[in-house]
Image (tube, rainbow, N blue to C red):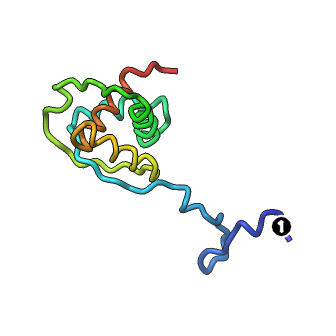
Amino acid sequence: MWPGRDRLRVVGKTGKFKALGSKELKGRPKRYKIPREVERLISKYSHTYGTQSRAIQVAAEILYRNPAPVTIPIDLLTGPLIGKTYKLPPRAIDVIARLAKRYGTLGNTLAACAVVLMDTPDL
């Protein structure tokens, strides 16, 4: 009948159509305990990538492919910890968990991501 209708499904009583598999494309929410300064830097330098989650994903991939660990300034690790939730794809969550073995904690890994984002030039 309609081209592409096989990729749609009816939602609710109103009969509106929604694309199949749209929930699978989104990331999963993951909560991290990070210093307030790290959260501020991630939000400041993520504008190049569109979203904070995408910026963390890119920075984590850069760290994962870099054999030498990044030096994290001590002032980034001090200060009050806050809980921050990011909607990340499963691959990024896995990469951050693997990097936590190198940097000690998940919060230190996100601090290293913030350092990478600071050093990345604006496009």
- Pick out the residue farthest to the front: 67
Give the x, y percent position of residue 92: 43, 46
Q: Find numbered disc 1 in the image and state the secondary structure of the residue it sits on.
A: loop
- Residue displayed at 40% across by 38% down: 56
71 left or right of 74? right
Q: Is residue 55 above or below residue 70?
A: below
Tag 1 residue = 2
Look at label 1 and name its amino acid: Trp
Left or right: 19 as drawn, with respect to 42? right
Of the pair 118 and 70, the residue shown nearer to us: 70
Q: Nearer the viewer, residue 102 or 106?
A: 102
Is 22 displayed left or right of 87 in the figure? right
Residue at the spot 35% in from the left edge and 44% down from the top edge: 96
Q: Residue 14: x percent and y percent?
A: 64, 77
Left or right for 89, reference 75: right
Please, which residue is most extreme toward the left here?
A: 79
Residue 111 to residue 85: above or below: above
Q: Residue at x 34, y 45 (%)?
A: 98
Q: Quadrant of the N terminus?
A: bottom right
> How far from the left and from the top, in percent, is residue 79?
13, 34
Q: Quadrant of residue 101?
A: top left
> Which residue lies most toward the right here?
1
> How crowded is the residue under tag 1: few (<14 C-alpha within 10 Å), some, or many (20+)?
few
Q: Residue at x 59, y 61 (%)?
A: 22
**Number of numbered discs overlaid on the protein picture:** 1
Q: Position of residue 47 (x, y in %)?
A: 45, 31
> Residue 114's image quarter?
top left
The foreground one among 5 and 110 is 110
Q: State the residue in front, 116 or 79.
A: 116
